[in-house]
Amino acid sequence: MEASDCGQVILATAMVLVKDSTGAYKLGRALLDSCSQVNFITDDFAQRLHLRPERHHIGIRSIGDSLTNLKARTTTTIKSRTSAFELSLQFGITSHIAYQPDAEIDTSTWNLPANTTLADEEFFKPRRIDLLLGTEAFFDALAVGQSRLGLNLPTLHKTLFGWVVSGRYQRQHYMPSPSCLLSSEDSIDANMQHLWELEAIDLPVKPILPDNHVCEDIFVATTHHDATGRMVASLPFKDNPSSLGYSFDIAHRRFLAIERRLLHSPDIRHQHVSFMEGYENLGRMSVVAAPNLEEPHYYIPHHCVLKPSSVSTKLRVVFDASCRTSTQTSLNDLLLVLLLRFRLYLYAITADVTKMYMQVLMNKNDCKFQYIIWRASPDLDLKTYQLNTVIYGTASAPYLAVRSLHYLANKYMVELPIGASAVKSSVYVDDFLCGADDVDTLHTLKSQVIEVLRRG
């Protein structure tokens, strides 16, 4: 909120749903800023969502030519609580954005319309901002509709997040106070303290939870090698999938929306089509000629995420298994979720498993929970496809992929003990981070890890 001699300006805020690392959504308070070229997320909120940071240096210049340096960014999806609107965005990670407003505002005489769904029902209370949505998100979310609350009062603006309150208003006996919209520089002391915390050892041993036992039992009972050596896993359901409702309509609606949007971006559309055709050609998805909709099934909406790199802009297709069906239940609501750990050594060796989730096949009986709608062009008929591998976006995907590595490690522990032990202890999702105390052992470690993974 900006103050001046002639009044105060309320900035637009909205409560939005933000996807965490498991595919579930949590509420966050977003500041809508049409003048920012960058989206921001606070470090605290990103950690609560367990979002994976990516090292990225960017300088943010503001009024007065002041420069703020950000050192990391992350990618996630936001969606509206009141409509089907959603966006996948990149966010610069910063320590602090703002408190909005500075002090609680008395709105008892404002006569807010009773039938108006506000994007932030407590816009008048001073609360910390979790996200800042910049120009790209602001104008995508903007809708047609405006209503003035009265003389010397702000205005209601319609957005796809709900109605936001924004604009100048005046009140008596106001004492302006300084405010800061964005700052991200941490002190040296704070950074040093964070370094020691990273090196600290957590001695207490956490008990194994019942869900872990259930998930492990399902994996051991259903996972196997197929004739080609591929791992074949099953979805670890914690509840009966018959509770899933109808999901075709929302998947259909969201597919048509992204199809219309990509018609205006030929380069991105070409990448999208190439990705999906490659998916089909490699056998990672296949057409379902006559899906049996009488048995439990699930249609997963999908969308595109752009991943800029030093060479080019790459496109990744993300599957939203947290999308709710007609019974307000999603696939992720029914899946067990587990987290695994990694550790560091003196001499390091690192690796990345390419398209890790796609390396693990899905049990054919569970492919009906991974239906999608797809066509390469609006001139073609829409078809139902099934995804034949573990996919990014399902709550159980990290567990199934990493547990498949452990399966291989256990199978070849006697024959390849150094590599198998490293696979079990030093993989975090698709990243391998390990090491040894001498170079010879490091070479042995490398060759054995490659051999263990090659056999899967």
Image (spheres, grey):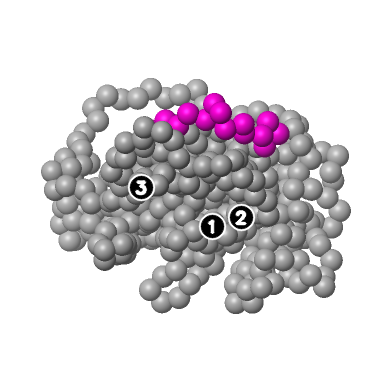
Within the magenta stretch, is there residue 317? no
Foreground pick, 434 / 112: 112
| Mark 3 lies on residue | 4
Secondary structure under badge 1? Answer: helix
Foreground pick, 244 / 410: 244
Tag 2: amino acid: Leu
Which of the two discs, 3 and 1, sits closer to the camera?
3
Foreground pick, 296 / 448: 296
Q: Position of residue 220 (x, y in %)?
A: 55, 36
What's drawn in magenta, residue-wise?
Answer: 103-116
Within the magenta stretch, is there residue 107? yes
Q: Quadrant of residue 63?
A: bottom left
Q: Are marks 3 and 1 in contact (CB under 8 Å)?
A: no
Cα gap from disc 2 to disc 1, whole angstroms: 9 Å
Residue at point 64%, 46% (across, down)? 147
Numbered tag placed on residue 137 in the rendering: 1
Tag 3: amino acid: Ser
- Looking at the rendered image, the quarter that the N terminus falls into is top left
Residue at point 66%, 69% (across, down)? 262
Tag 1: amino acid: Ala
Q: Position of residue 142 (x, y in %)?
A: 61, 55
Q: Is residue 174 visible?
A: yes
Q: Is residue 45 left or right of residue 273?
A: left
Q: Is residue 61 above or below residue 417?
A: below
Q: Quadrant of residue 214?
A: top right
Q: Earlier in the sequence, mark 3 or mark 2?
A: 3
- Classified by dominant secondary structure, the portion drawn in magenta counts as loop
Q: Is residue 336 above or below residue 383?
A: above
Foreground pick, 274 / 135: 135
Q: Is residue 320 visible?
A: no
